[in-house]
Amino acid sequence: MRRSPLLVLTALPLSLTLLAACGGSSAETPAAPAASSGDDHRAEAEATEVGAAKARVAVTYDGGVQVLDAATFEVLADLPFDGFTRLNPAGDGRHVVVSAAGGFHVVDAGAWSEPHGDHAHYYTAEPHDTDVVYAAEKPGHVVRHAGKTTLFDDGTGHVVSFDSEHVAHDAVAEGEAREYTTPAAHHGVAVERSDGTMVVTEGTEEARTGIRVLDAQDEQIAANDQCPNTHGETVAADETVVIGCSDGVLVVKGTEITKVQSPDAYGRIGNQWGTDESPIVVGDYKSNPDAEVDLTTRISLIDTTTATLRLVELPGGTSYWYRSIGRGENGEGVVLGTDGQLHLVDTAAGTVTRSTPVVDPWEVQEDWQAPQPQVFTMDGTAYVTEPATKEIHAVDIETGEVYASGTLKVTPNELTAVPGEVTE
């Protein structure tokens, strides 16, 4: 459900004193016990019941992760993590997975819901590191689909998949996880579908070449090795999986794998964004293999129904990078350009329908780990970071209104969010 505009906090330091009045809550009421880890029980014992779901935003910076109130951008917790860290929702609407030294760390964002017949109860607590870590040499992609969370270790090729609701229980230790290891370690990805089949990349440290489809017993039932530099995945309508290549994509429907060729000999689609309702996938698109920074001005639209691909030029030839793309609730493509505008793309028509100024013009950096503007979309809102000013903005995707802004005391890098309620 789209969040309605709430307030604007333009360029205000996020002090607890100034913002405490923005997040009212009722007297403390312990949540009813649920099947959860001891750490979750501790959080629930200290919970406050509130009237509606409280979304959370998380950002990384050099030294840790901050968890923010998504409505006010008040800093609710500042958690230390060493080195470059990555962020993903865990898939249960409550927890965030932090890829850091040692593996995939589970952080409780401090907001959740508990269904109760024809309604639900909503709770908040202090965000914290749960101390649950899924060990990995090189923690890589985190995929959420069909109620499953799947982790891929680039250092070993080890895949762990489990029910998303078990993420904070240490699903591996509890024997609740499916585990599989690829023949060779590589920078890869895996996704488990609702029928138990798993699509997993194939490759080595030197080259990534394609994918395999496994049945529920991890036996190969389909494969394709015509996907050079295999990278990224998403899921479209009807559980159709799309995997990126340096010359197009692979579209996986059931056990049928179709190669969709790029219009250029080198047309790399390394990152994709799909929705469960739309058959069209949004992808990035790079066509210059020799560029240190490929300032691409086109995005790709892959129609999984017809197995076709078309390119859409952004207004004014503006460029973007792969972390400045998202999807709206109605299947729209959302792209933050280096012109500082958030461009809305009608994926069915293949046209840009609106451009909204959000941040100052910026440049794509050669170092992909350097802080750059990022976009994360959730519940009708595009959350946008602006590292140059240490700001974060909330944009109503439907109207284009920048309805909230706040200033952090740290330079934001990675960005993610959770709705604070059970996700379907």
Image (tube, grey):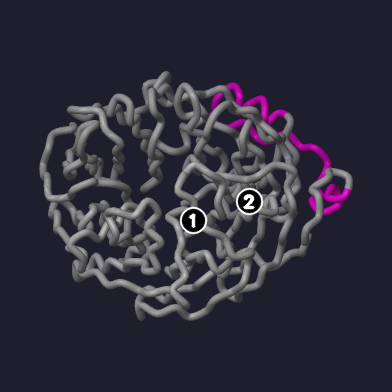
Q: Would you place residue 99 above or below residue 409 in this image?
A: above
Q: Which mark is residue 276?
A: none
Res 224 seen here: no
Q: Which residue corresponds to mark 1?
A: 364
Residue stretch rendered in magenta on the structure: 18-45
Residue in the image at 63% along x and 67% along y = 358
Residue 214 at x, y percent in the picture: 17, 39
Crowd rating for badge 1 (residues with CA inside 10 Å; few <14, some 14–19, many 20+): some
Residue in the image at 22% along x and 42% along y = 197
Q: Secondary structure at mark 2?
A: loop
| Quadrant (top left/top right/bottom left/bottom right) for the N terminus | bottom right
The kind of residue tagged 2 is Pro
Alpha carbon distance from label 1 to label 2: 12 Å
**Seen in the image, is 261 located left or right of residue 6?**
left
The kind of residue tagged 1 is Val
74 and 62: which is toward the camera: 62
Residue extending furthest toward the top? 173
Q: In this figure, what is the number of numbered marks?
A: 2
Residue 321 at x, y percent in the picture: 45, 57
Q: Which residue corresponds to mark 2?
A: 387
Q: Would you place residue 260 above or below residue 129 in this image?
A: below
Residue 191 picture quarter: top left
On whether residue 19 falls in the magenta region, the answer is yes
Residue in the image at 65% along x and 53% along y = 388
